[in-house]
Image (cartoon, rainbow, N blue to C red):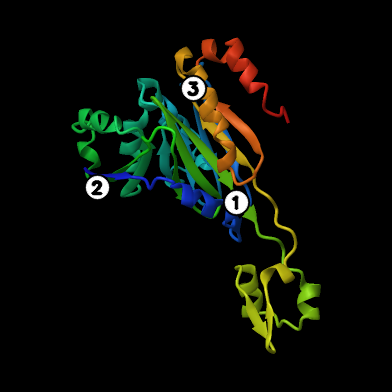
């Protein structure tokens, strides 16, 4: 099996400024994006999958996750699964991962996962088990960089970023804004002919008609705003104080979007802690 380790580019202060000013518009946003709870810590270890028209993103892969995906393949589409993200390195986080790799190897030759560099040793331990997956290139993108946000994926639907702390990694999914509809009446007023000019404007390109510069904002309606999702794990009580500071750092990195959902992959005894409850209550219940 070919394993490629790649450390993701760190976000420099200068890049933060550039990121704040960048557009989050996409003209190819999926018609439907769903989050499905694969395990809630009762029957199966905590795991969720985010699905779109084009690809699926799996967060943690405990025992039984592979079976669940296969049983519901009509909706979850194993062939669309390209990336797995781990919030930690405990056995519960990854116990079903290598079985999933063997299954995926039958339909694709590349698979990526995101998590701590400690996974390097875990992969070495399971190398013999994975011999039958010799056709798969298993790429490990390292997320270790305490307190630093790392850009992982930037596609039509999401900008996905990680923020690590001690042995835990949180993931921020920032949904792209869907570009506004082309306003045909305005196009007629500006004498823009249907065809390639329409397509260029919808793609965010500036065009010229009879010497007049026309920008997309001149003929497009308001974009449909996306939201932000945070997926995190607070595995131990001694993480709590530092964890609050870490989570507060999410705000500067969501491009001004509202955090609509936070997924807590956290043990019940931690989730029921009064300090943890107080922190959760600081977020808008809506």
SS under mark 1:
loop
Going from N to C along the chain, the mark reached first, 1 or 3, is 1
The residue at 71%/83% (across/down) is 193
The relative height of residue 39 versus residue 120 in the rendered view (above or below) is above
Foreground residue among 259 and 180: 259
Going from N to C along the chain, the mark reached first, 2 or 1, is 2
Going from N to C along the chain, the mark reached first, 2 or 3, is 2
Camera sees residue 144:
yes
Residue 176: assigned label = 1
Q: How far separated are the C-alphas under marks 2 and 3?
A: 42 Å
The residue at 50%/44% (across/down) is 160
The residue at 58%/59% (across/down) is 28
Camera sees residue 38:
no
Q: Which residue is mark 3?
A: 242
User: Residue 145 appears at what percent x and percent y?
Assistant: 38, 36
| Label 2 Cα neighbours within 10 Å, binned few <14 / some 14-19 / many ≥20 | some
Q: Which residue is mark 2?
A: 135
- In which quadrant will I find the N terminus? top left
Q: Is residue 62 left or right of residue 198?
A: left
The relative height of residue 243 versus residue 189 in the rendered view (above or below) is above
Indicate the quadrant where residue 10 lies. Answer: top left
The relative height of residue 255 versus residue 47 in the rendered view (above or below) is below
Q: Residue furthest bottom?
A: 210
């Amino acid at each position: 099996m070919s394993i490629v380790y790649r450390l993701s580019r760190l976000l420099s202060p200068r890049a933060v400024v550039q990121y704040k000013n960048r557009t989050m518009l996409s003209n190819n946003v999926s018609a439907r994006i769903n989050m499905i709870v694969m395990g809630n810590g009762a029957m199966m270890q905590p795991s969720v999958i985010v699905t779109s028209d084009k690809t699926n993103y799996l967060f943690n892969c405990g025992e039984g996750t592979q079976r669940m995906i296969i049983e519901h393949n009509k909706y979850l589409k194993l062939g669309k699964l390209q990336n797995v993200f781990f919030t930690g390195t405990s056995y519960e986080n990854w116990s079903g991962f290598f079985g999933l790799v063997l299954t995926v190897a039958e339909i694709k030759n590349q698979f990526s996962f995101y998590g701590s560099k400690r996974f390097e040793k875990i992969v070495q331990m399971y190398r013999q088990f994975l011999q039958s997956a010799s056709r798969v290139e298993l790429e490990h993108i390292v997320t270790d960089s305490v307190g630093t946000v790392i850009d992982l994926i930037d596609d039509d639907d999401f900008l996905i970023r990680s923020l690590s702390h001690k042995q835990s990694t949180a993931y921020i999914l920032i949904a792209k804004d869907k570009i506004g509809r082309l306003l045909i009446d305005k196009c007629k007023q500006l004498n823009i002919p249907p065809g390639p000019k329409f397509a260029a404007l919808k793609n965010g390109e500036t065009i010229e008609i009879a010497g007049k510069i026309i920008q997309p904002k001149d003929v497009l309606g308001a974009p449909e705003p996306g939201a932000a999702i945070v997926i995190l794990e607070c595995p131990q009580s001694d993480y709590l104080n530092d964890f609050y500071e870490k989570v507060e750092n999410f705000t500067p990195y969501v491009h001004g979007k509202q955090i609509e959902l936070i997924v807590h992959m956290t043990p019940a005894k931690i989730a029921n802690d009064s300090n943890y409850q107080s922190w959760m209550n600081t977020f808008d219940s809506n």
